[in-house]
Image (cartoon, rainbow, N blue to C red):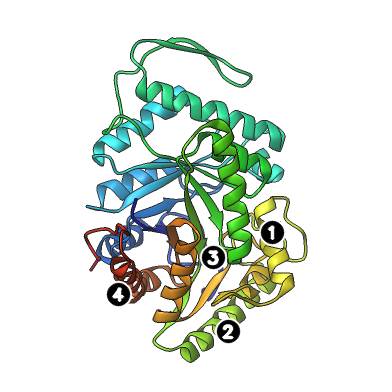
């Protein structure tokens, strides 16, 4: 499979590091412009995130499909709020409309307080067990003929039959997380596994853990997806000036309480393992490997993907290739100035990575280079 690029669908022009802080909502015209820019830039995928205050991810994924020609939404879904038979039909319909342009990213939930905002009082272990059943049901609804029944710990139904199937018969399923429970579900059930951007050694260790579960289950290894927030410029010096300006604004927003709704407190310790791991990396040092920069992790409270790759277009492209070399086949990059950064990535970073991969014997790359 070729190395592919993932963005993230921004529905407003704000982030943790824009003046005034991050604002939630759904700016329809901005989102349309952003999706068009991803198409033009040559991105393969775009994550449609899930959060209790945000617009429904399935509706935003539908919007992406309707307003693009190539980019594929990776629809984040949190099991527990929609029955899996209904979800399977809804996802199949979006996939049919997009002619096979859909992926499902299962997020089990690592924060009890966030889960309870929508009425879920299950434990973390229960949430991962539920996700396991949810994925099993999705695949059965999509692929099996005739009525199906299921009797599990979390879901039970009898004689269900759907008249709708995905465009190519099934839809790729991604699992994300940094806990052992996440590795288990991802290795045993996922086609793709998503990680936040950690140093190369730690990333390789996580890949090994996921693959061990896949091996034990007799399954192919999931494709690995790793996520960064690059800060790029024509030269390394200019990129570092830009990085420190972004950091200063993020710190100002943190002090003003405008990092975004339901962010963890910067002084506190987040519950989810992924954020804990990022903070531990940041505590060990600001710069890791070729270009991985961590101060924005601390400044924002590690509320999500917050590690940056900082440098010139060439430096960041080489840093991304370092991750491809250890087995990351999907490279997720989104910026701190979402629309302008997506355009810059498409012009200057994606082509460099694809050109280098094309020179390597036996390495498949997408036919298009974007733009």
Query: What residue is pinned by disc 4?
Result: 347
Relative to 209, is 137 on the left or the right? left
**Is the residue under label 1 in contact with that under label 4 (CB below 8 Å)?**
no
Mark 3 surroundings: few (<14), some (14-19) or many (≥20) residues within 10 A:
some
Q: Secondary structure at mark 1?
A: helix
Decide which of tag 3 and tag 1 comes sooner along the chain: 3
- Residue 229 in view, yes or no: yes
First in sequence: mark 4 vs mark 1: 1
Q: Tell me where residue 308 appears, x and y as whole percent.
A: 54, 71
- The answer to the question of whether label 2 and label 3 lie on touching residues, with beta carbons closer than 8 A, is no
- Name the residue rendered at 30%, 31% in the picture: 166
Marks 2, 1: nearer the viewer: 1
Q: Classify mark 1: residues with Cα within 10 Å, few (<14), some (14-19) or many (20+).
A: some
The residue nearer to you, when weighing 171 against 202, is 202
Between 201 and 301, the residue placed more toward the observer is 201
CB atoms at circles 4 and 2 under 8 Å apart? Answer: no
Residue at the spot of label 1: 277
The image quadrant where one finds the C terminus is bottom left
> Mark 2 = which residue?
244
Cα separation, mark 2 vs mark 1, equals 23 Å
Which comes before the other along the chain, label 3 or label 4?
Answer: 3
| Corner quadrant of residue 154 | top right
Q: Earlier in the sequence, mark 2 or mark 3?
A: 3
Which mark is first along the chain, 2 or 4? 2
Structural distance between the alpha carbons of marks 3 and 1: 24 Å
């Amino acid at each position: 499979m070729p190395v592919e690029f993932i963005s993230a669908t921004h529905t407003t022009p704000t982030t943790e590091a824009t003046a005034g802080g991050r604002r939630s909502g759904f700016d329809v015209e901005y989102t349309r412009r952003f999706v068009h820019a991803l198409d033009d830039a040559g991105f393969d995928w775009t994550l449609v995130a899930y959060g209790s205050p945000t617009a429904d991810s399935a509706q935003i994924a539908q919007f992406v499909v309707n307003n693009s020609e190539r980019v594929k939404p990776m629809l984040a879904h949190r099991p527990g709020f929609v029955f899996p038979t209904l979800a399977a039909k809804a996802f199949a319909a979006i996939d049919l409309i997009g002619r096979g342009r859909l992926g499902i990213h299962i997020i089990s939930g690592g924060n009890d307080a966030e889960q309870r905002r929508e009425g879920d009082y299950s434990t973390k272990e229960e949430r991962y067990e539920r996700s396991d059943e949810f994925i099993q049901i999705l695949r059965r609804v999509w692929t099996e003929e005739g009525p199906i029944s299921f009797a599990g710990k979390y879901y039970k139904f009898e004689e269900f039959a759907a008249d709708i199937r995905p465009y190519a018969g099934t839809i790729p399923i991604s699992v994300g997380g940094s806990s052992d429970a996440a590795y288990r579900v991802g290795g045993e059930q996922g086609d793709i596994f998503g990680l936040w951007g950690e140093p190369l050694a730690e990333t390789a260790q996580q890949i090994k853990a996921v693959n061990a579960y896949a091996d034990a289950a007799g399954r192919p290894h999931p494709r690995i997806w790793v996520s960064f927030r690059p800060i790029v410029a024509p030269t390394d010096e200019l990129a570092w000036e830009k990085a420190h300006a972004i950091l200063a604004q993020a710190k100002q927003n943190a002090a003003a309480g405008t990092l975004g709704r339901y962010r963890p407190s910067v002084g506190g310790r987040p519950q989810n393992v992924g954020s804990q791991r990022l903070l531990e990396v940041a505590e060990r040092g600001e710069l890791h490997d070729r270009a991985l920069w961590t101060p924005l992790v601390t400044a924002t409270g590690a509320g999500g993907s917050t590690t940056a790759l900082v440098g010139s277009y060439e430096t960041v492209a080489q840093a991304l290739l370092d991750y491809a070399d250890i087995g990351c086949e999907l490279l997720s990059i989104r910026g701190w100035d979402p629309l302008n950064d997506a355009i810059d990535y498409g012009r200057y970073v994606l082509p460099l990575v694809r050109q280098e991969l094309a020179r390597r014997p036996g390495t498949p790359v997408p036919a298009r280079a974007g733009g």
